[in-house]
Image (spheres, helix red, strand yellow):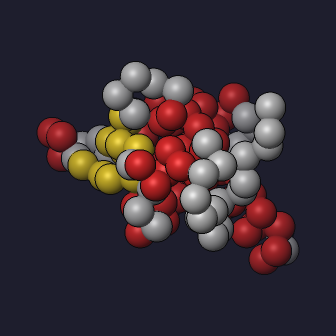
Amino acid sequence: MTKVFAQKVAANQRLIILRALSEVNDGRLNETLLMHKLDAFGHTASRAELRDQIRFLEGAGAVTVEFPGEAVMVATLTRRGQDHVDRRGDPIEGVDSPSRI
């Protein structure tokens, strides 16, 4: 996979993660459920790769991360992440822009 294509894949995965979080009432999902969501959109990512994407989003201020029970990562959508999904404010660099539906 070329570097440019790998960056496009990662940006798409990050958008899928943000959309998945925005679809649940409390904006929180664990990494296992997020992996299923990525699978549904044709992305086969390892747990380490998924965690890298979640950490990227955390660094961008789009999610917060916690480890309840210390075994599973849980991501929570922030206002910045929701704004990206809703196409409000400044887009997050490195995350695909959501399409207008």
Q: Would residue 29 appear left or right of 38 to someone viewing this image?
A: left
Residue toward you, 76 or 31: 76
Identify the residue at the far top of this view. Answer: 25
Residue toward you, 19 or 54: 19
Residue for point 41% across, 49% down: 79
Q: From the viewer's perspective, is residue 85 above or below residue 24?
A: below
Q: Quadrant of the C terminus?
A: top right
Q: Quadrant of the N terminus?
A: bottom right
The image shows residue 53 at horizontal and vertical percentages of 52, 58
Picture quadrant of residue 86: top right
Picture quadrant of residue 92: bottom right
Residue 48 visible to the viewer: no
The image shows residue 15 at horizontal and vertical percentages of 64, 49
The image shows residue 49 at horizontal and vertical percentages of 54, 57
Residue toward you, 16 or 62: 62
Identify the residue at the far front of this view. Answer: 89
Residue for point 60% across, 32% down: 37
Residue for point 47% across, 30% down: 33
Identify the residue at the far left of this view. Answer: 69
Picture quadrant of residue 100: top right
Q: From the viewer's perspective, is residue 43 above or below residue 25?
A: below
Number of numbered discs visible in the structure rendering? 0
Residue 27 visible to the viewer: yes
Q: Would residue 40 appear left or right of 81 to someone viewing this image?
A: right
